[in-house]
Amino acid sequence: MEGISKMKQEDAFELPEDIVNHPKHYTSGSIECLEAMESMMEDAPNVDSFSNYHWGIIFKYIWRWPHKEDPLNDLKKAEFYLKNLINRLENEKK
């Protein structure tokens, strides 16, 4: 019983996760996903808005997949958006 009551006391001092502003699956490491994404996209001024949107989504899913309950789901989402972007860029070349 002592172990259970000690565990509950320790849990009471943990701060709740900020799931809106700083969810754990976006804040791994020393920087947040959003900060890394902003830095990455600053150096690509010639990317159109459609491609930029897809790039951001792909990056987000790749960033967080190891921290999700179903990591394969996020990788498949990234794959979907990557294939969509590739198809669009290939069609632009035609």
Image: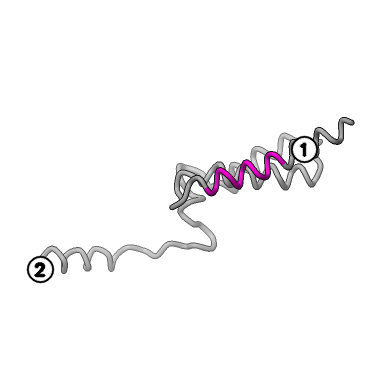
Q: Main secondary structure of the magenta part?
A: helix
The residue at which mark 1 appears reads as: 87
- Amino acid tagged 2: Met
Task: Tell me, yes or no, whether the highlighted magenta stretch contains residue 27.
Answer: no
> Residue at the location (72% across, 47% down)?
53
Residue 58 rendering spot, x and y as whole percentages: 63, 43
Q: Which mark is residue 1?
A: 2
Q: Tag 1, which secondary structure?
A: helix
Q: Tag 2, which secondary structure?
A: loop
Tell me where residue 47 sits by quadrant.
top right
> Residue at the location (64% across, 40% down)?
39
Tell me where residue 21 sits by quadrant.
bottom right
> Residue at the location (49% across, 57% down)?
23
Q: Write down the region rendered in magenta.
A: 73-83
Mark 1 crowdedness (10 Å alpha carbons): few <14, some 14-19, many ≥20: few
Q: Is residue 5 left or right of residue 20?
A: left
Q: Earlier in the sequence, mark 1 or mark 2?
A: 2
Please tell me which residue lies in front, 34 or 61: 61
Please tell me which residue lies in front, 88 or 37: 88
For the residues labelled 1 and 2, the Cα–Cα distance comes to 60 Å
Please tell me which residue lies in front, 29 or 65: 65
Mark 2 crowdedness (10 Å alpha carbons): few <14, some 14-19, many ≥20: few
Q: Is residue 65 left or right of residue 54?
A: left
